Image (cartoon, rainbow, N blue to C red):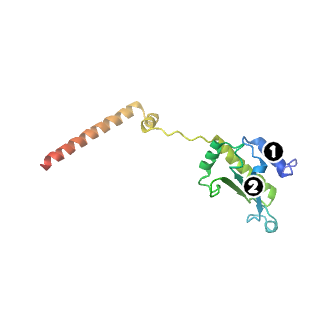
């Protein structure tokens, strides 16, 4: 642990906010501390070291933009951190035997997810012909078109011969 580390949760939040782009307001967070199943021996049986942070998107409309919320929902859809209603994100940490360090880790994880959602840009989908130009040379594309034209002509002649043989 650092010698000059901030001691209160509010001081730690201020230190973390300096490092990241999106600033989380502590009053918008729901914090729950419960008994942890993680490491810590008798300590976890006696104290509430597991930290669970819930950030409700409705409460954060003043400082969290809609595109960031939409990106966060896209990125977190498969991880299970969104609530069932999809209106909040829930981060849980029980990695250490200290309540304050679990809170720090959960807050840092939430902050990183928000920053990733802010920086997220969806890749543009290219049409097949545009994609082909990025992957193949002009000669290869021309050869591809020539092959397909010959194949279509051959198939057309085959169908025509088949039709003539029926009568």
Q: Position of residue 13 (x, y in %)?
A: 80, 48
Q: How many marks?
A: 2
Mark 2: secondary structure:
strand
User: Left of 134 or right of it: where is 40?
Assistant: right
In the image, is residue 17 above or below residue 56?
above
Q: Which residue is mark 2?
A: 30
Residue placed most toward the observer, 150 or 61 = 61
Residue placed most toward the observer, 153 or 166 = 166
Q: Earlier in the sequence, mark 2 or mark 1?
A: 1
In the image, is residue 107 above or below residue 143?
below
Label 2 crowd bin: few (<14), some (14–19), many (20+), radius 10 Å? few
In the image, is residue 145 above or below residue 166?
above
C-alpha separation, residue under disc 2 versus residue under disc 1: 19 Å
Label 1 crowd bin: few (<14), some (14–19), many (20+), radius 10 Å? few
User: Left of 36 or right of it: where is 83?
Assistant: left
Q: Residue at x 14, y 50 (%)?
A: 166
Mark 1: secondary structure:
helix
Q: Position of residue 96 (x, y in %)?
A: 77, 59
Q: Position of residue 113 (x, y in %)?
A: 67, 48
User: Left of 78 or right of it: where is 5?
Assistant: right
Residue furthest to the top: 138
Image quadrant where residue 101 sits: bottom right
Q: Residue at x 62, y 51 (%)?
A: 76
Q: Which residue is mark 1?
A: 15
Name the front one of labels 2 and 1. Answer: 2
């Amino acid at each position: 642990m650092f010698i000059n580390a901030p001691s209160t949760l509010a001081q730690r939040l201020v230190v973390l906010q300096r490092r990241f782009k999106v600033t989380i307001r502590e009053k918008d967070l729901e914090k729950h501390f419960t008994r942890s199943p993680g490491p810590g021996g008798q300590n976890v049986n006696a104290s509430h070291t597991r930290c669970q942070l819930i950030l409700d998107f409705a409460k954060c409309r003043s400082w969290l933009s809609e595109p960031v919320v939409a990106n966060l929902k896209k990125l977190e859809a498969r991880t299970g951190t969104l609530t069932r209603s999809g209106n909040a994100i829930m981060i849980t940490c029980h990695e250490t035997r200290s309540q304050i360090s679990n809170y720090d880790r959960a807050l840092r994880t939430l902050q990183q997810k928000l920053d990733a959602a802010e920086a997220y840009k969806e890749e543009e989908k290219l049409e097949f012909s545009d994609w082909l130009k990025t992957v193949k040379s002009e000669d290869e594309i021309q050869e591809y078109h020539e092959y397909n034209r010959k194949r279509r002509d051959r198939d057309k002649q085959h169908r025509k011969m088949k039709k003539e043989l029926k009568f």
